[in-house]
Image (cartoon, rainbow, N blue to C red):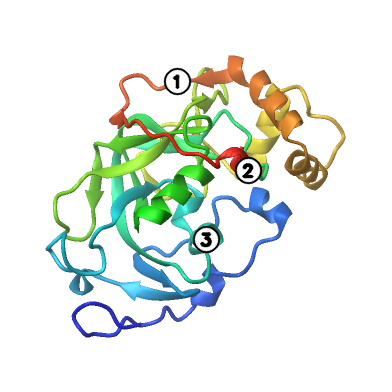
Amino acid sequence: MRFHGGDDLVEIADSASYLVPISEIDRARKYPYHAPSGGFVLSNGDLFHLDESHLSHDRKDGILAGRTAVLSVGSNRAPVQLLRKFGMSATVPVTPARLHDCDIVHAAILGYYAAVPCTAFPSSGTIVQLNVAWLDDDQLIQMHRTEGIGVAYDFVEMQTVEHQFKLPIAPVFGYAARAGVLDCGDGMPAGLAAIPVEGRQFTTLTQDQAAAKLRQLAKIDDDRTMPQFIAEMQADKSTRDAIIDRLRPFAIQPQNPPWQLQAVQIDGIDAYL
């Protein structure tokens, strides 16, 4: 892939491992999916290395020009999810970042594909290794839709993001779960096992453990296997909504979070709720 400046980006050697299609059951069980540790570009269904030397420090020039920086805290970190959301023809640059004084924890919601999704939550001294997806205007609108903006998630401006590349000063946005986070015991949330964290202060749960906890709290921890439960939840929005309603007493809202709400209204979100 050739980018502004004339040099070629080099394809990631094991890129296929990040782009293997995920079954409907594994969309829930393997959330938040496999993501490279550094910068990358997803372009036309392929994955390329991206490092600081490839970037222009002028916001009006280069591969990031005209794009909005959006912090990825869960599945949006992963190339396979970006490919699913934006399609084979999309180009999405992604840069590494660290989120300070927050952890990434399980939200008090059941996603439309039956994962227990995640959100940032204040945690003094905790540092999370994440990435930032640089979205063009159409991609940002589609991302709002897939996040269920205004219903499942709010669009926010993040205040404690540290880029790992030297980049022009510009706001970094993200998504915060409107329902709050899941009380996983003693009024405390639980962090995602799949997310690299320094100084975690909360219990850590895998996706399967979080799903089991959700079923316990919603009083639906019956004899259905997890694959059976996932398949039924994916097929029945009314049942998902009822479970989300049952989780309200077990939801924790952040106090003084390091982000600011942004006003956004987007149509077409019903398919992602």
Q: Describe the element under mark 3 as helix, strand or loop.
A: loop
- For residue 10, above or below residue 223: below
Is 258 situated left or right of 239 in this image?
left
Q: State the image coordinates of residue 103 (x, y, percent, origin top left).
A: 39, 37
Q: Describe the element under mark 2 as helix, strand or loop.
A: helix
Q: Is residue 133 visible?
A: no
Dot 1 and dot 2 residues touching (CB under 8 Å)? no
Is 73 situated left or right of 251 in this image?
left
Q: State the image coordinates of residue 169 (x, y, percent, origin top left).
A: 14, 50
Q: Which mark is residue 34?
A: 3
Q: State the separation of the CA atoms marked 2 and 3.
A: 24 Å
User: What amino acid type is highlighted by mark number 3?
Assistant: His
User: What amino acid type is highlighted by mark number 2?
Assistant: Ala
Q: Quadrant of residue 94?
A: bottom left
Q: State the image coordinates of residue 236 (x, y, percent, origin top left).
A: 77, 37
Is 158 situated left or right of 145 in this image?
left
Q: Quadrant of residue 113?
A: top right
* Residue that mark 1 sits on: 253
Q: Which mark is residue 219?
A: none
On-image quarter of the C terminus: top right
Depth check: give the residue in front, 126 or 133: 133
Farthest front residue?
Answer: 267
Count of numbered tags: 3
Q: Label 1 neighbourhood size at 10 Å, few (<14), some (14-19), many (20+)? A: some
Residue drawn at (65%, 20%), measured in percent from left and top?
245
Q: Label 3 neighbourhood size at 10 Å, few (<14), some (14-19), many (20+)? A: some
